[in-house]
Image: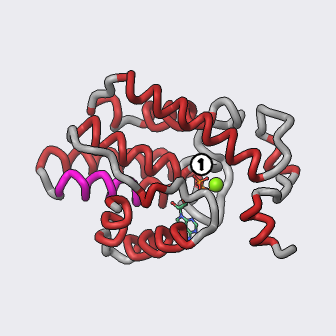
């Protein structure tokens, strides 16, 4: 069986390094991990619905970490903590704090000055934060949830639909999403906005 097929079946065993930070020791495959994470994320969504989040609270390092912890804290020990190693995606880990501060400041400026539409502000934020890649894992889902929180709780508009996918599986939808991210890297944010809206 090819690796990709194994992945799609969710049967790929986790390696030792991945298991290291796991809180639930019975999880042994990627599929089981995806399910536990999804349950945790659904709890986090419930939390955001009842938390009555205000703009001043959302655009802070503390909230960004708290949200990650809410999304993954039942599953991963390091949830809510910035990574302290480099990855193939994301900036040098030492720069995370300062780059996140720059992003937060830019976003506040965009909001105050209406530099872009609400949708564009939320999606630009999402693109920049996933490029920073604050955490060891879970950055993609966290960045999309941040965009949803920004559009809903800061601008009072409906959340994005993200192709009705959590993009965990390496399917066609995920390919289109990664392509849109690459275009955003090259300065064209529109495909990612379009992707989020559909
Ligand atoms: N070339 C790329 N390949 C895969 N993911 C990328 C790439 N560039 C940016 N990303 C972003 O990184 C995310 C994957 O990071 P990860 O921390 O594993 O998040 P998650 O576990 O939520 O998928 C993707 O969802 C995407 O938003
Ligand atoms: Mg991941």
23 versus 105 height, above or below: above
**Quarter of the image holding residue 61?**
top left
Residue 170, position in %: x, y? 63, 67
Residue 20, position in %: x, y? 82, 42
Q: Which residue is pictured at 70% across the width and 35% down the height?
A: 75
**Quarter of the image holding residue 128?**
bottom left
> Residue 98 versus residue 163: which sits nearer the camera?
163
The total of numbered circles placed on residues is 1
Number of residues whose C-alpha sits closer than 10 Å to that of mark 1, classed few (under 14), some (14–19) or many (20 or more): some
| Residue 47 relative to residue 160: left or right | right
Q: Is mark 1 within 8 Å of ligand 1?
A: yes
* Magenta portion: prevailing SS class: helix
Q: Which residues are magenta?
A: 117-127
Q: Which residue is pictured at 38% across the width and 53% down the height?
A: 161
178 versus 15 height, above or below: below
| Residue 10 relative to residue 60: left or right | right
Question: Can residue 46 be found in the magenta stretch?
Answer: no
The quadrant of the rendering that contains the N terminus is bottom right
> Residue 4 versus residue 23: which sits nearer the camera?
4
**Quarter of the image holding residue 79?**
top right
The quadrant of the rendering that contains the C terminus is bottom left
Q: Quadrant of ligand 2?
A: bottom right
> Residue 124 versus residue 196: which sits nearer the camera?
196
Residue of label 1: 138
């Amino acid at each position: 069986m090819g690796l990709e097929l194994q992945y799609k079946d969710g049967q790929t065993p986790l390696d030792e390094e991945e298991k290291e930070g796991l809180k639930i020791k019975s999880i042994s495959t990627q599929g089981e991990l995806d399910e536990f994470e999804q349950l945790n994320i659904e709890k986090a969504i419930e939390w955001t619905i009842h938390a009555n989040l205000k703009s001043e609270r959302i655009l802070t390092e503390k909230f960004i970490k708290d949200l990650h912890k809410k999304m993954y804290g039942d599953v991963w020990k390091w949830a809510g903590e910035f990574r302290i190693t480099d990855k193939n995606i994301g900036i040098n880990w030492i720069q995370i704090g300062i780059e996140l501060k720059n992003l937060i400041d830019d976003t506040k400026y965009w909001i105050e000055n209406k530099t872009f539409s609400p949708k564009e502000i939320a999606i630009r934020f999402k693109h920049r934060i996933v490029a920073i890649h604050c955490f060891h894992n879970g950055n993609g889902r966290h960045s999309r949830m941040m965009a949803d929180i920004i559009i809903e709780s800061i601008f009072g508009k409906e959340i994005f639909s993200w192709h009705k996918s959590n993009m965990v599986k390496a399917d066609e939808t995920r390919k289109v999403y990664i392509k849109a991210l690459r275009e955003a890297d090259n300065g064209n944010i529109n495909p990612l906005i379009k992707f989020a809206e559909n």
